[in-house]
Amino acid sequence: MFFGVPAQALFGQLLIGLINGSFYAMLSLGLSVIFGLLNIINFNHGALYMMGAFVAYFLLQWAGLGYWCALLIAPIVIGLVGVVLERTMLKRLYHLDHLYGLLLTFGLALVIQGAFRHAFGSSGLPYTIPGELAGGRNLGFMFLPNYRAWVIVCSLVVCFGTWYVIERTKLGSYLRAATENPTLVRAFGVNVPRMITLTYGFGVALAALAGVLAAPIYQVNPLMGADLIIVVFAVVVIGGLGSIMGSIVTGFALGIVEGLTKVFYPEASNTVIFVIMAVVLLVRPAGLFGRER
Amino acid sequence: MKRLFTLTAVAVVFGCGCAQAQYTDGTIKIGVMNDMSGTYSDLSGQGSVVAARMAVEDFGAAAKGMKVEIVGADHQNKPDVGSNVVRTWIDVDKVDVIVDVPTSSVALAVNEIVRDKNKVFLVSGAAASDLTGPKCTPNTIHWTYDTWALANGTGKAIVKTGGDTWFFLTADYAFGHALERDTEAVVLKNGGKVLGKVRHPLNTADFSSFLLQAQASKAKIIGLANAGGDTTNAIKQGAEFGIVRGGQNFAGLLVFLTDVHGLGLQTAQGLIFTESFYWDSNDKTRAFAKRFAERNRGIHPTMIHAGVYAAVTHYLKAVEALKADDGTKVITRMKEMPTDDPLFGKGTIRPDGRKVHAMYLFEVKKPTESKAPWDYYKLRATIPAEQAFRPLDQGDCTLVKK
């Protein structure tokens, strides 16, 4: 027993926290990559996450393509949307203050969300769990739905894969170099603008992937991104803006903290992350994993 | 001289009173306020504005020489936003009647303002039974349903069929608390037990943590004292966590047609709940639904939309009869006149402001039973009007003489 909660129940809650954390991790990872390389605070991340879920829904309704195809196609489609956004709009803002990027993307998020809500309403659309992942197993201390286990595995693979590519490969070193000194990297014959465009596309594709993963758990709902994005921003700030490992670790950790709050004092479960954020900003303004500049 | 002056003054006052015995500014202005962008926007939202507009058209206000205007606003489920809108509406825009207002915390705030300003408040969306209980006012009518009626309908039916141990998942604001309180009372009264409860914030995306707690309680029934997206998410994720297969069942204490639509019949089938209106009940409701859906992006009317239509209709009848739009006078007139509209049929309004009509216990159809889009409910039982709502003397309303 811990504070009146049986140990078994606590294990269950830890695992649940980890599952929610995997969504935070995947979304904050995309934000971090984009901020780290483009210096854009991408406030329409939540809207693109929502669009990812909607693409999955459209594919099923209109083309009869199921979950597994959606898992592949939705990130590509949304990645392309991201590329278009970057080419037509964001590109013009790199030399300006962060605030401009934030305002533009925030405005875009409101427009996208409003358009989807107008077209599809606020009650959400049904999307069922794929047959292969339906059901669940009894772990003794809790009933774990197979689909949730799949979400954790998927998220861990994607997160650490991304971290590895950026921190440990040649391509990643180009990317990092291009953010430090784009002129010099261009002098070596690397097409920097194209690299930046593709990075943005990749970042939002991660959001779309998270959206497809989320579709069977939550409703496919125009508002699904709006609720999540604020929390994810807190995660990024706590982890340290632009720190890749920081956002992954913080994402999972805060999922767990939130899960535990839901047991001990559920009323505070949607504020606890912001309390932590305030404390972290006071003690370490650059975030837990961020570097002071 | 002095006497003459007094007489003149009296004449002027009465003169105004008679010749202008109409509307404060020549127009009746109806303000429909609800959630137009958030989790409750399908079950109320723009649809309520459409319903109010249809009520005005069907009443034939223009032909009768009444000038009626309708305005709409989004309260974002926030009492402070809602209060500001209503103050501006009444003070600046000369709105005479506030309609709908789901989200009980907002409705309770509006309730006080409307009483202070002596206007009319017709509640369709909000649920808290306090609106006709301790918080009742001579300016408010609660039309469609309330937490007591939901608890009485669904709670009693479930306890009677063996669901005697409960665990509550409750939305942490006025409405959730009221619904939980009223349902708990029904459960205990009918010999059931409440094993636990957990309060979650409004608009919770992930219920898994709460569902695990509900599972661990071993209660037979998990009572959902919440609404809209919170209810649908809890049910959907409950299916994933094997709640029903594990022998527990959900009691959706407040479920709307649009929630069932969002869940899909596969997930929602078998769910039992109480409502006061279903579009596919008779020819009149079907005709209304058809016209309504055409104007509301295909979304069929929920009981909230129906309530807005019926309440506005009855309001206009009272104003027409009274030839005035003074707040308490219109309300008094509305309470005196029996109600009659195509959606709820004949009914009455009690001194505490409670509109009384039958409530219905519905069950969601299996996918194979549904013949057409939006064909979702089958009727399990009808709760007659005299049993559907809290008895008049038990609400602690000050308007009721003991």
Image (cartoon, coloured by chain):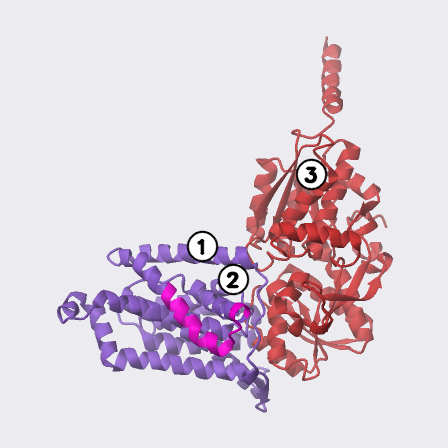
Chain colours: A purple, B red
Residue linked to disc 2: A222
Nearer-the-camera pick, B146 or B116: B146
Q: Is residue A271 above or below residue A257?
A: above
Whether residue A217 is visible to the viewer of this picture, yes or no, is: yes
Calculate the distance from the C-alpha at mark 1 to the C-alpha at mark 3. 39 Å
Subunit of label 1: A
Residue ID at (23%, 73%): A176
Q: Is residue A240 left or right of residue B176?
A: left
Magenta-colored span: A61-81
Q: Amino acid at mark 2?
A: Pro
Q: Is residue B84 above or below residue B215?
A: above
Same chain letter for marks 1 and 3: no
Question: On the picture, is B202 further left or further right than A202?
Answer: right
Chief SS of the magenta region:
helix
SS class of the residue under badge 2?
loop
Mark 3, other Cα within 10 Å: few <14 / some 14–19 / many ≥20? some
* Residue behind mark 1: A111
Q: CA distance from mark 2 to mark 3?
A: 39 Å
Q: Quadrant of residue A279?
A: bottom left
Q: Say the numbered circle drawn on residue B118.
A: 3
- Nearest to the observer: residue B173 or residue B283: B283
Secondary structure of residue under mark 3:
loop
Q: Residue furthest top?
A: B1
- The chain under label 2 reads A
Front-most of residues A54 and A64 = A64
